[in-house]
Amino acid sequence: MIIYENLLYNQDIAHVTEIKFPWYKLQNRSIMISGATGLIGSFLIDVLLEKNTQDGLNCTVYALGRNKEKAMERFSKHANNSHLIFIPYDVRLPLKIDNVGRVDYVLHLAANTHPMLYATDPIGMITTNLIGAQNMLEFSAQHNAVRFLLASSNEMYGENRGDVEFYDEDYCGYINCNTLRAGYPESKRCSEALCQAYKQQKGLDVVIARLTRSYGPTMNMSDTKAVSQFIKRGVAGEDIILKSEGTQYFSYTYMSDAVSGLLWVLLTGENGEAYNIADESGDIQLKDLATNIAALSGKKVVFEIPDGVEASGYSKATKARLNGAKLKGLGWVPEYNIKTGVERTISILKELYD
């Protein structure tokens, strides 16, 4: 079956469309989204197109991605929807488009977030994050966009120095920049700095959304993040493989909550500010996450020593819990905790892949 036939997925879409955002800001506007077929981007596009259908929002979506065939398959429900325009694009190249009208909002969601790529293609990972951000910022400035949103990462905080339990938006932890693995968090930090540079030098309105480790049924099944691998094995009814002691304590966010957070930041955030999309109910130690998913499938957790390539792509952070109070001050309220979000994800994916 396709994802649009799944009841729970449609409920997720409906939930976000019913949130009392200032939707009028998107009325008769256009929004450009890089990373359109990704975990976050694809669900956001489904939400926007459904809002068009429900309430006549009349918002045109320019979806950027490298693979048109993949996009057409993913958005099969909207194949003949004039409000969805797919544009083949690699974010490492300057964005030059002649056949589009005004672009009001630009959301840069494209990024390499697969730990295996951090080890096997560190150059591509860094350039995608950094050069991609610059290209999207430059396009936004040249086209006088109303607002630019950067999807950043909890990894930009680095390692907890042991002085706080939760990271607020002003916290700065330790990163050993002279390592291969530093490429991802450092490129995210620099991308945020670029946003501030474009705000100051070119007068671009920018906001930054710092995502936690996100998951959901729109995840890429080849994703090498631990939570994605756990979920994939849970869906397949296999033992969960844990390649560490599992004491890492992180924040996680379900797909629809991440997108509702993005929309709060986009539509109500203050120019130049960063916001954590995180809630305490999504925090869990990796070993407990593995155990919970194994229990859902009636399987067990198996410990396995990672090989050298895998280990070099793993985050060195042991505790990264984000404080979401600033975003909640805008009105964001998460719908799912880590338990209900994971159960929902596995339920949807099992139905899809059956």
Image (cartoon, rainbow, N blue to C red):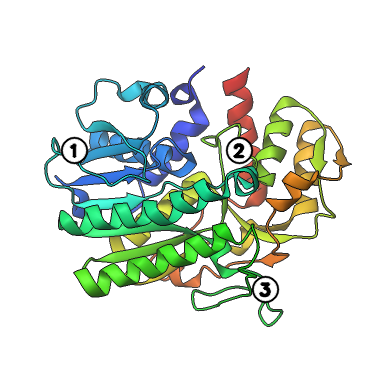
Q: Picture quarter containing residue 294?
A: top right
> Viewer-nearest of labels 1 and 2?
2
For label 1, the SS is: loop
For label 3, the SS is: loop
CB-based contact (under 8 Å), mark 1 and mark 2: no
Q: Amino acid at mark 1?
A: Gly
Q: Residue at x 26, y 35 (%)?
A: 54
Q: Which residue is mark 2?
A: 223
Q: Residue at x 61, y 20 (%)?
A: 353
For label 1, count other residues whose C-alpha is less than 10 Å away and answer few (under 14), some (14-19) or many (20+): few
* Label 1 or label 2, whichever comes before in sequence order: 1
Q: Amino acid at mark 3?
A: Asn
Q: Nearer the viewer, residue 137 or 230?
A: 137
Q: Amino acid at mark 2?
A: Asp
For label 2, count other residues whose C-alpha is less than 10 Å away and answer few (under 14), some (14-19) or many (20+): some
Q: Which mark is residue 220?
A: none
Q: Residue at x 51, y 55 (%)?
A: 334
Q: Which residue is mark 3?
A: 160
Q: Is residue 108 left or right of residue 55?
A: right
Q: Which mark is residue 56?
A: 1
Q: Is residue 155 above or below residue 352?
A: below
Residue furthest out toward the bottom = 163
